[in-house]
């Protein structure tokens, strides 16, 4: 019974794919289940919101079909299987989404082999884009924020202590920060890598306190872990001991701020997006988000990247009038520029297919009774991924 | 001469509590020997030391003149020491045939064969069936051990031990918890066992002990009180006092 | 069941999984990558069933072997540049077996909760090692760049997953064949004996501990091969092959299907993975609820898993049928 | 180290009842959510919210005990473990449905914030409070189990259920009450720890390994075991993180393996 149903469905899918060539199918993979399953909706909502607002800008007769899949967290074999099915069965024109680096890495060969353009909307390890000529990234790299932060910190502080989660992105952030900080003449007192599943931060932070650095650089996965660190930081009195907490924007994500409470005040971060960003495009984005999903909801950097990624895909559809050719699409992606992103002007680096964007120096402050990442200055404009720039020189 | 089983000054204490004290014990080849004693005399501890389930505090154990004091349980079995358990210890959900066949296969060294199906090992199965037949269990071979009446389960215990072709067989209360009619049956089967096997029986049922055993050792408070043929034991005053007396009073 | 009283002929129902797999290949060519995934997990579940279902070893760390196999196959390609699939498989099997002997020899003297904990700690340590040794394993980014040559120099791993599916199917068939022989052999009967009554096995002179180490190693080897298959079909290894989660998942799959019944290892992963695939697509956010409820229900009402339930129903039906026919006979 | 406060409750269910309750984290999570809800939505003061967490979780657990757990006391460890995994999954889904994706916000009252000076060093006030609180808790529990009639009855019932039943102890009710107490303590622990261990829907699964370690190392069948183990591992873990942070997670696992190989029954295990 069930089998025949599936067969029928499959047959139907084949036929319908042939009949409506003007439907652009986007295979969208993100995480809904698993411990980080809370992140998926931030991306999906942004994509849906963009489609809803801009559908009428598509060439007449062209429709977008979003096929959503759950990769259940950092689960590369599952992600690969889903990508394969999306390509083989659903015949998607584009792949998009992906929160976790290993998932993106395992999907890369499929994008290459099937020649399906693949828009990465989060996964931030630098090397990803080198793994397939069909990958373009609209999100960020960890080097992009940690390296400028190191440059900034070197001007202000003499000694720094680094504390990062012990996994790929943590290592990236640590290396980038340390390199820039040292180049600027700073001194790294000590570097500690903490297991990902770490329930208690007091011991690590006590050690930091005893080492008395000018500043503590922290990178940990966005979310409640960051909250725990903030609370411990304040409880142990590191702030009073004159230690400044800094890090890439992941440690003070916009949606987590209310949970952190006042302990987060004064934390300085470098990042490419803040929901509190004072740009018209961003204000419109946030307003649209709240209108669609409720006043208590706030978009975050995943949302911004997904929004921009969808904008890029729309551009490719418009230019090709709904007929997606992989190589032409990639060419369009490579020359894509977007002045009105919620995060300011962005573009894709034609050489590396990676994002080029501004990095903002922010501080957590109270705005109208609520905590927000207030952008102090545009520390660096149009930053390319520093890691790739260095690789080129070598 | 070589004894089937022999202990020398065997002692066991748990902390301050001494449960076996200087036990010198000899089991002759082909003997029908009984070990009796009141509750808490240390019989089970003694048996457990013989089989290797627990290690003695001091003293030595010999199996056919070979010292086995520190030898593992499994190795003692391979040297010819078989046992039954006071509390029935069977593979309850397995068929009776399998209960015996596992032991037979183990003895033959076939238990690690991984390729030919067990049910194709006719030699193991035939031997097991034969064994079951001698104990009157031929008709029950296919039944699950747990579905058998208790008396028959006790016989399966014996069958498993016999499957090991032991030179020495320790029967730990083979008739415990069995209705008296079945005790008779068990006794009849025990009497038929090959004369080459030395049997040490630990039993509470005095009737059974005196009919079966040719020699009796009385254990009291971890010590050998007296040893001798049944008539002597029955006549011994000390035994009457500590043991038979107590039994009748109770 | 297995043992000396068993009928070891292959029943017609036992061919059903293979017929189904064949039908799957031809009828659902677009689902082959899911299919291959299922086949791999069946092999993994089968290896777990051997120790859990037959020998009674409770483990929450079977992913140690699966993961080690996966990484070994990958590293053989990335570090030694050996892309021959059979060499990768053999290397994975060997390394997993080695770990099986080494850890088995240490931990198999313990039982129950202690054993559970030790197995878990071992896979957790391996996970930590894989995470830290970035130069070797790629750390949290995963090990990419794994290359696998065409099988026998001819069958390329294609995008549709045809080769992968058939490759895994053959591997599973061989694995099934080995396990089936194993459990029906005297060795298998002996394992059942250990599970049923360890004291008794000691008393009949079986070196229980060494036997457990042996079967643990065999199982580890199989799990390692399953892991290697995952690497080869994905050309990628992620940290998710190690640790508590995959161990728990495979345990749940096996229990769902039915422990200690050869085909429980087949049914479980099929139901679990298809349900995951289906539910996760329909209600991605709440699929836990479904699988959790199912698990509680199985534990409470169907301890034998799905297959156990099928058996029960069949027995009931058979006895009803017998009653009826005997009633009819006596009526005459 | 605070994580281990929670396992005090676990040592009651596991230690006294011999039930491998991996789903303990579920009750801790519930406690955390109740505290957060009570404080944030209804403005309940902190101490009262703690009481609410304890009482509500106890009541909830009685319900679960009645319909689910009580069926499993006599079953094997494997069944218990699996059942708990199932329960964890369901609880996580429910928590996510009700509370969404973010961690429950918890804000301590001012008198528990900041630092206090002890022996010339600064210690966070809240942690000192937690340590004192759990110390008092374990002492009173201990005397409760060792000295009172209730304690004697529970211990008797665990040793030999049939026997206890036959001398007129209502084991069913006894187990129910004990279970409720254990779960209530878990809820209390979850609530107390919520500030340090953020309570989110993934909570029961994330900390599962730690619960397991505590119980295995402490040994089944004793109240003292898990508590001492919790303390020991907590201190060792914290010390290791302070002195040799590079070793990170290795130590906990290595120590677990070491202790279990040294004493397979756990430090205070009583089962032979």
Image (cartoon, coloured by chain):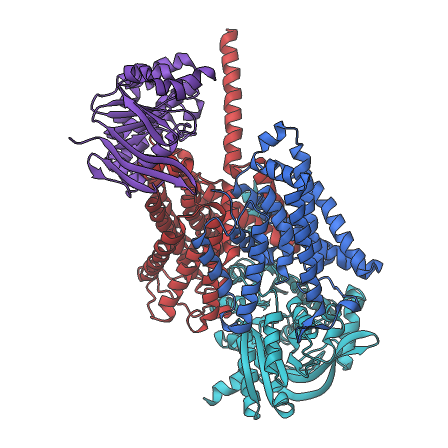
Quadrant assignment for the N terminus of chain D: bottom right
Image-based side of A89 in relation to C90, left or right: right
The image shows residue B194 at horizontal and vertical percentages of 22, 21
Determine the image quadrant of residue A13. Answer: bottom right
The image shows residue D154 at horizontal and vertical percentages of 63, 39
**Observer-nearest residue: C271 or B209?**
B209
Image-based side of C274 in relation to D46, left or right: left
**Observer-nearest residue: C314 or A68?**
C314
Q: Residue furthest top?
A: C332
Residue at 80% across, 64% down: A294
Considering only vertical position in the picture, is C220 above or below C54?
below
Considering only vertical position in the picture, is A243 above or below B165?
below
Image-based side of D93 in relation to A298, left or right: left
Q: Colour of chain C?
A: red
Q: Colour of chain A?
A: cyan
The image shows residue D64 at horizontal and vertical percentages of 68, 42
The image shows residue C229 at horizontal and vertical percentages of 40, 57
Residue at 74% across, 75% down: A275
**Observer-nearest residue: A222 or D16?**
D16
Considering only vertical position in the picture, is C109 above or below A114?
above
Q: Colour of chain D?
A: blue
Q: Colour of chain B?
A: purple
Determine the image quadrant of residue A19. Answer: bottom right
> Can residue A266 be seen in the rendering of this structure?
yes
Residue at 67% across, 57% down: D134
**Observer-nearest residue: D81 or C254?**
D81
> Can residue B165 be seen in the rendering of this structure?
no
Number of callouts: 0
């Amino acid at each position: 019974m069930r089998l025949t149903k599936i067969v029928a469905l499959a047959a139907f899918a084949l036929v319908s794919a042939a009949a409506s060539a003007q439907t652009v199918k986007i295979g969208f993979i993100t995480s809904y289940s698993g411990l980080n399953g809370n992140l998926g909706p931030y991306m999906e909502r942004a994509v849906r919101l963009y489609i809803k607002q801009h559908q009428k800008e598509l060439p007449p007769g062209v429709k977008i079909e979003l096929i959503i899949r759950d990769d259940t967290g950092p689960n590369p074999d599952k992600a690969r299987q889903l990508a394969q099915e999306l390509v083989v069965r659903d015949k998607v024109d584009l792949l998009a989404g992906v929160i976790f680096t290993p998932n993106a890495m395992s999907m890369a060969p499929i994008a290459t082999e099937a020649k399906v353009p693949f828009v990465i909307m989060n996964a931030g390890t630098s090397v990803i884009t080198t793994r397939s000529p069909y990958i373009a990234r609209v999100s960020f790299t960890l080097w992009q924020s940690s390296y400028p932060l190191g440059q900034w910190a070197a001007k202000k502080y003499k000694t720094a202590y680094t504390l990062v989660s012990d996994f790929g992105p943590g290592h990236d952030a640590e290396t980038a920060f340390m390199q820039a900080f040292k180049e600027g003449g700073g001194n790294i007192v000590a570097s500690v890598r903490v297991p990902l599943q770490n329930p208690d931060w007091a011991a690590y932070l006590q050690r930091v306190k005893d080492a008395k650095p000018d500043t503590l650089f922290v990178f940990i996965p966005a979310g409640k872990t960051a909250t725990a660190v903030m609370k411990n930081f304040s409880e142990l009195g590191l702030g009073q001991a004159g230690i400044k907490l800094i890090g890439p924007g992941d440690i003070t994500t916009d949606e987590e701020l209310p949970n952190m409470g006042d302990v987060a005040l004064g934390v300085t971060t470098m990042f490419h997006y803040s929901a509190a960003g004072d740009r018209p495009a961003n204000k419109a984005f946030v307003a649209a988000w709240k209108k669609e999903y409720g006043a208590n909801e706030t978009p975050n950097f995943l949302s911004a990247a997904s929004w921009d990624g969808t904008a890029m895909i729309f551009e490719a559809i418009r230019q090709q009038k709904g007929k997606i050719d992989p190589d032409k699409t990639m060419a369009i992606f490579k020359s894509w520029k977007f002045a009105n992103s919620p995060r300011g002007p962005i573009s894709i680096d034609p050489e590396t297919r990676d994002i080029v964007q501004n990095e903002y120096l922010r501080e957590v402050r109270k705005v109208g009774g609520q905590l927000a990442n207030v952008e102090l200055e545009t520390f660096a404009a149009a930053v390319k991924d520093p890691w790739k720039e260095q690789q080129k020189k070598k | 001469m070589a004894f089937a089983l022999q202990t020398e000054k065997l002692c066991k204490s748990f902390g301050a509590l001494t449960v076996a004290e200087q036990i010198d014990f000899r089991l002759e080849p082909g003997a029908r020997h009984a070990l009796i004693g009141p509750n808490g005399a240390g019989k089970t501890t003694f048996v457990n030391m013989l089989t290797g389930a627990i290690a003695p505090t001091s003293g030595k154990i010999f199996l056919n003149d070979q010292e086995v004091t520190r030898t593992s349980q499994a190795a003692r079995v391979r040297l010819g020491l078989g046992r039954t358990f006071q509390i029935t210890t069977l593979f309850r959900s397995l068929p009776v045939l399998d209960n015996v066949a596992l032991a037979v296969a183990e003895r033959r060294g076939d238990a690690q064969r991984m390729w030919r199906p067990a049910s194709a090992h006719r030699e193991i199965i035939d031997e097991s069936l034969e064994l079951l037949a001698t104990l009157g269990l031929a008709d029950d071979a296919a039944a699950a051990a747990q579905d058998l009446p208790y008396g028959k389960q006790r016989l399966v215990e014996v069958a498993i031990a016999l499957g090991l072709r032991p030179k020495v067989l320790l029967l730990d209360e083979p008739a415990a918890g069995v209705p008296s009619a079945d005790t008779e049956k068990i006794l009849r089967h025990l009497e038929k066992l090959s004369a080459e096997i030395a049997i040490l029986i630990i039993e509470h049922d005095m009737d059974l002990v005196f009919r079966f055993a040719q020699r009796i050792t009385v254990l009291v408070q971890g010590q050998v009180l007296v040893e001798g043929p049944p008539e002597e034991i029955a006549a011994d005053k000390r035994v009457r006092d500590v043991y038979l007396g107590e039994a009748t009073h109770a | 069941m297995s043992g000396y009283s068993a009928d070891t002929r292959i029943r017609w129902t036992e061919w059903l999984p293979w017929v189904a797999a064949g039908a799957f290949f031809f009828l659902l060519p677009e689902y082959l990558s899911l299919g291959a995934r299922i086949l791999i997990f069946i092999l993994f579940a089968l290896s777990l069933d051997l120790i859990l279902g037959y020998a009674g070893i409770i483990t929450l760390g079977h992913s140690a072997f699966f993961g080690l196999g996966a990484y070994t196959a990958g590293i053989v390609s990335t570090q030694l540049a050996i892309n021959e699939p059979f060499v990768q498989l053999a290397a994975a099997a060997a390394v997993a077996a080695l770990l099986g002997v080494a850890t088995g020899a240490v931990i198999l003297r313990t039982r129950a909760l202690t054993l559970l904990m030790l197995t878990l700690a071992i896979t957790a340590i391996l996970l930590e090692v894989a995470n830290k040794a970035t130069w070797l394993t790629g750390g949290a980014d995963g090990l990419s760049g794994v290359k696998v040559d065409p099988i026998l120099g001819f069958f390329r791993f294609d995008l549709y997953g045809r080769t992968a599916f058939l490759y895994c199917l053959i591997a599973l068939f061989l694995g099934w064949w080995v396990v089936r022989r194993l459990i029906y052999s005297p060795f298998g009967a002996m394992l059942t004996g250990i599970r049923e009554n360890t004291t008794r096995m000691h008393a009949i002179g079986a070196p229980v501990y060494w036997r457990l180490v042996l079967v643990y190693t065999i199982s580890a080897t199989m799990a390692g091969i399953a892991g290697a298959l995952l690497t080869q079909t994905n050309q990628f290894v992620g940290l998710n092959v190690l640790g508590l989660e995959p161990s728990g998942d495979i345990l749940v799959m096996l229990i769902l299907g039915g422990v200690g019944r050869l085909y429980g290892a087949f049914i479980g992963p099929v139901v679990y993975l298809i349900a995951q695939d289906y539910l996760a697509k329909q209600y991605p956010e709440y699929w836990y609820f479904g699988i959790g409820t199912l698990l509680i229900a199985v534990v409470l009402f169907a301890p034998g898993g799905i297959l156990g339930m099928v058996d029960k129903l069949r027995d009931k039906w058979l006895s009803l049928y017998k009653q009826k026919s005997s009633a009819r006979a006596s009526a005459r | 180290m605070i994580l281990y406060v929670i396992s005090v409750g676990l040592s009651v269910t596991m230690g006294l009842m011999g039930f491998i309750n991996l789903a303990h984290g579920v009750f801790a999570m519930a406690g955390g959510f109740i505290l957060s809800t009570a404080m944030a939505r209804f403005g309940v003061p902190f101490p009262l919210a703690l009481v609410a967490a304890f009482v509500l979780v106890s009541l909830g657990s009685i319900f679960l005990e009645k319909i689910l757990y009580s069926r499993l006391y006599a079953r094997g460890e494997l069944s218990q473990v699996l059942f708990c995994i199932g329960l964890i999954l369901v609880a996580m889904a429910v928590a996510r449905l009700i509370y969404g994706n973010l961690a429950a916000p918890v804000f301590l009252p001012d008198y528990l914030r900041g630092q206090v000076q002890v022996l010339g060093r600064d210690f966070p006030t809240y942690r000192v409070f937690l340590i004192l609180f759990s110390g008092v808790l374990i002492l009173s529990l201990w005397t409760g189990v060792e000295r009172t009639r209730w304690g004697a009855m529970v211990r008797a019932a665990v040793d030999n259920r049939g026997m206890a039943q036959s001398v007129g102890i209502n084991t069913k009710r006894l187990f129910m009450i004990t279970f409720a107490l254990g779960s209530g303590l878990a809820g209390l622990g979850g609530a107390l720890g919520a500030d340090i261990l953020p309570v989110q829907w993934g909570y029961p699964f994330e900390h599962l390994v730690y619960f397991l370690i505590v119980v295995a190392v402490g040994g089944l069948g004793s109240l003292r075991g898990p508590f001492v183990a919790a303390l020991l591992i907590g201190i060792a873990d914290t010390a290791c993180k302070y002195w040799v942070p590079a070793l990170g997670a290795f130590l906990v696992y290595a120590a677990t393996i070491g202790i279990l190989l040294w004493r397979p029954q756990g430090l205070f295990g009583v089962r032979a």
